[in-house]
Amino acid sequence: MTDPVFLVAELPAVGPTVLDGPEGRHAALVRRLGPGETLLLADGVGGRAFCVVVAAERDSLRLDVRSIERVPRSTPTVTVVQALPKGDRGEAAVEMMTEAGVDAVVPWQASRSVTRWKEARGDKALARWRSTAREAAKQARRLWLPEVADPASTADVRKLLASVDAAFVLHEEAVEPLAIIALPSELGSVALVVGPEGGIAPDELEAFVAAGAVPVRLGPTVLRTSTAGVAALAVVNARTGRWT
């Protein structure tokens, strides 16, 4: 059985420490970890500490940190621009993409998105996306937490696409499959754009292509906006060696 992961703001030094706060409460009350059991502390930026539980308190654990390790971020980095979908499909998309290793998710207010993030409603939705990414990263035992950015306009997305080494727009009318399209020899960053249920508007696609993005397709079937991102991410992971 794999060791559970708990997120902390900063890794402790080797030796005794205490896991308290929400993570400590979860470890003690929900996971019911006890003396002799092992766990990992992660700081979300590549660091992890291997720990043994010394004692369990009501809402915290006393630990012995045995060793600390730092793991570099996977390359190339992959950002997924996710158009706002209906209902809770956005959270499902964030969860799956986080498990598959996405480095950043950019919520995009596409012109054909039915959902609109406005004021308090938008703040709550963004908070849910970020919480989903955090919990999914723990479940997947990821050492690098993905960033969930502030909502982006089409102009913002265009600037992002112009700044990366390779940018691809998932589009049902594209000719080139993502699985075989040529990739740059020097590839440090990739961006993928996933449109809303109503599809990407022609003017949006034109703007993205002008920024250097290439329209691509995944296969013969049409995927939901909530599943297209993780499918494309899996292709990129396999093609670039991120999953080796």
Image (cartoon, grey):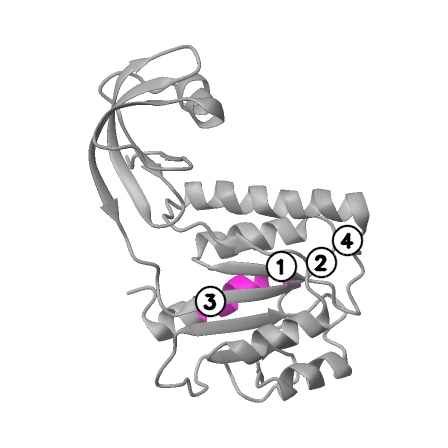
* For the residues bearing labels 2 and 1, Cβ distance under 8 angstroms: yes
Residue 33: % across, % down: 34, 20
Mark 2 packing: few (<14 Cα in 10 Å), some, or many (20+)? many
Against 144, is 157 above or below?
below
Q: Secondary structure at mark 2?
A: loop
Q: Which residue is mark 3?
A: 78
The residue lying at 25 percent from left, 16 percent from top is 35
The image quarter containing residue 235 is: bottom left
88 left or right of 5? Answer: right
Pair 3/1: label in front: 3
Q: Secondary structure at mark 1?
A: helix
Q: Which residue is mark 1?
A: 226
As measured in the structure, the alpha-carbon distance from the residue carrying label 2 to the one carrying label 1 is: 7 Å
Three-letter code for the amino acid on which mark 3 is drawn: Val
Residue 156: % across, % down: 67, 70
The residue lying at 51 percent from left, 83 percent from top is 177
Quadrant position of the C terminus in the picture: bottom left
Q: Which residue is mark 2?
A: 85
Q: Which residues are magenta?
A: 224-235
Query: Which is nearer the eye, 102 or 176?
Result: 102
Q: Earlier in the sequence, mark 3 or mark 1?
A: 3
Residue 98: % across, % down: 48, 53
Three-letter code for the amino acid on which mark 2 is drawn: Pro
Against 167, is 4 above or below?
above
Mark 4 packing: few (<14 Cα in 10 Å), some, or many (20+)? some
Q: Was residue 179 drawn as part of the magenta stretch in this picture?
A: no
